[in-house]
Image (spheres, rainbow, N blue to C red):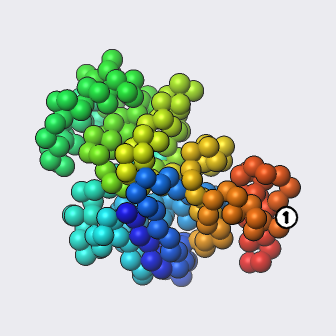
Amino acid sequence: MLEVENFTKRYGDFTAVEDLSFEVAPGEILGLVGPNGAGKTTSLRAFAGILKPSSGVVRIAGHDLEREAIAAKRVLAWVPDTPNPFELLTVAEHLHFTALAYGVDDEAQRAPRLLEELELTEKRDALGSTLSRGMRQKLAFACAFLRDPKVLLLDEPLTGLDPKAIRNVRDAIRQRAEAGAAVIVSSHLLDLVERLCGRILVLHRGRRVALGTLEEIRAGATNAKGQSLEEVFFAITEDAHEEA
């Protein structure tokens, strides 16, 4: 569903991401992890069509993101780490705008269910400018889910959420994957990634240093002192730092 081939992003002489290749299948949740500056957000923004790759190809449901941008973006949804809703639109108007933009015919049935699922019903008439950080995050999810995207790109999706909302959003992500969406979750919350994701992609200084299930990555982490993703992550990134 999502195919990345030899993706590279440069800013002048600085290479943010170099020669990255991987795929995410329908129904799969891939965890994207790495230290600060590893290239995670740069990669996600490029996969969402916000940044243009310096080289390489990104395909969304078979559509080349650069050559068939409209077709590709129709089937993907991007939730950034800091959502910025329209200040003068209400929560309900955000969903209506999204439905109009993407041709969602059954908004009248879907929107109320999403508002309830994400605990936004009481905020349906609240302006974007009045929403808390957590409510803005929930609204971004509602707008993304409204379209039933085939590819979901999530950058630090649980930031600002309370414990109950974290559980609800985590369950909602699983449900979309079970329905066939290909999902990438980028997060520093390694416990979340370990519990939610079937495979994990580890970036370090813009390069892929590991890709696979936790068991597969653990087997290749020679200095891991424990079995958790946190311990494996530290071992892999420390090895990569020494090799660099």
Left or right, 63 with reference to 155: left
Which residue occupies the foreground of this view, 101 or 9?
A: 101
**169 shown above or below 60:** above
Classify residue 172 by image quadrant.
top left
The answer, for residue 71, to whether it is visible in the render is yes
Towards the viewer: 83 or 61: 61
Q: Nearer the viewer, residue 6 or 54?
A: 6
Q: Which residue reaches farthest top?
A: 122
Q: Secondary structure at mark 1?
A: loop
Where does residue 38 sit, x and y in percent of width and height? 61, 64
Whether residue 203 is visible here, answered yes or no, is no
Q: Residue at x 37, y 63 (%)?
A: 1
Amino acid type shown at disc 1: Asn
Give x and y (percent) for residue 45: 42, 61
Q: Is residue 152 left or right of residue 71?
A: right
Tell me if residue 70 comes above or below residue 105 in the rendering.
below
Q: Residue at x 69, y 63 (%)?
A: 216
Q: Find residue 56 and report its image quarter.
A: bottom left
Instruction: Give the residue at mark 1.
Output: 223
- In the displayed structure, would residue 139 be above or below residue 21? above
Q: Give the left or right position of residue 105, taking residue 29 as reference.
A: left
Residue 105 locus on image (x, y percent): 13, 41
Relative side of 17 to 65, left or right: right
Question: Which residue occupies 71% across, 52% down?
Answer: 229
Number of marks in picture: 1
Residue at the (19%, 49%) spot, across then down: 102
Mark 1: few/some/many CA within 10 Å (<14, 14-19, 20+):
some
Which quadrant of the rendered structure holds the C terminus?
Answer: bottom right
